[in-house]
Amino acid sequence: MIQITTNKNQSLAIFDCISSSHKSLEENLFICGILEKAAEVKINIDMIAGITGLPSIPDKVGLGFTFDGCDTSKFLMIVKNQEIKVRPLINCGNAKIVIKSPEMVDGVGFAAKVFAILQNLECSPLLITTGIDEISLLVHESFSNSLENQLKKIFENSDSE
């Protein structure tokens, strides 16, 4: 059984070009401080994803995560009150779509179907995270209804086969 759920009004924070140098480790602990402060004010951080070692910027890392759009002003206050050199890019008005199935544990082809639908809709996901039995996509909210409908159509048909 495949479950597809959508959560709208999601915000995305991206901290880009954080130094990966060991010399800057203390400087980069600000992420821990931001996450701790977010927890203190009951902001649920989700879909955490990082990227490292890009050839164009080998000594930098990027970190992104989502949170409920209703908490954007609280998050901005946290960032404002932290002494940090890297300011986040905040992207609001997004939807998180989760495709979840125990069949993903041993099955194949789920990601291929998801990416085919994204391509057909000309929808570029802002963030993708996965677990052993799920794929989570963050897309602009304007794509959420058509994407959810297409996912349900494709996966409901494969469920009945």
Image: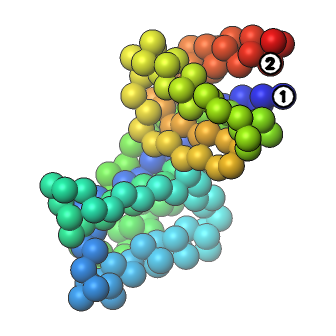
Q: Is residue 142 visible?
A: no
Please determine whether, in this image, residue 122 is positioned above or below residue 131: above
The one of 75 and 116 positioned closer to us in this rendering: 116
Residue 130 x %, y %: 59, 46
**Which residue occupies 35% across, 68% down?**
80
Do residues under tags 1 and 2 come within 8 Å of each other at their CB atoms? yes
Residue assigned mark 2: 159
Residue 100 image label: none
Residue type pointed to by label 2: Asp
**Which residue occupies 44% across, 33% down?**
125
The one of 110 and 49 positioned closer to us in this rendering: 110
Please determine whether, in this image, residue 95 is positioned above or below residue 149: below
**Which residue occupies 39% across, 67% down?**
79
Measure how far apart labels 1 and 2 are at the Cα level.
7 Å
Please determine whether, in this image, residue 129 is positioned above or below residue 98: below
Residue assigned mark 1: 1
Q: Residues within 10 Å of mark 1 (few under 14, many from 20)?
A: few
Please determine whether, in this image, residue 16 is positioned above or below residue 68: below
Q: Residues within 10 Å of mark 2 (few under 14, many from 20)?
A: few
Residue 144 x %, y %: 56, 23
> Left or right: 108 with respect to 54?
right
Residue 51 x %, y %: 36, 57
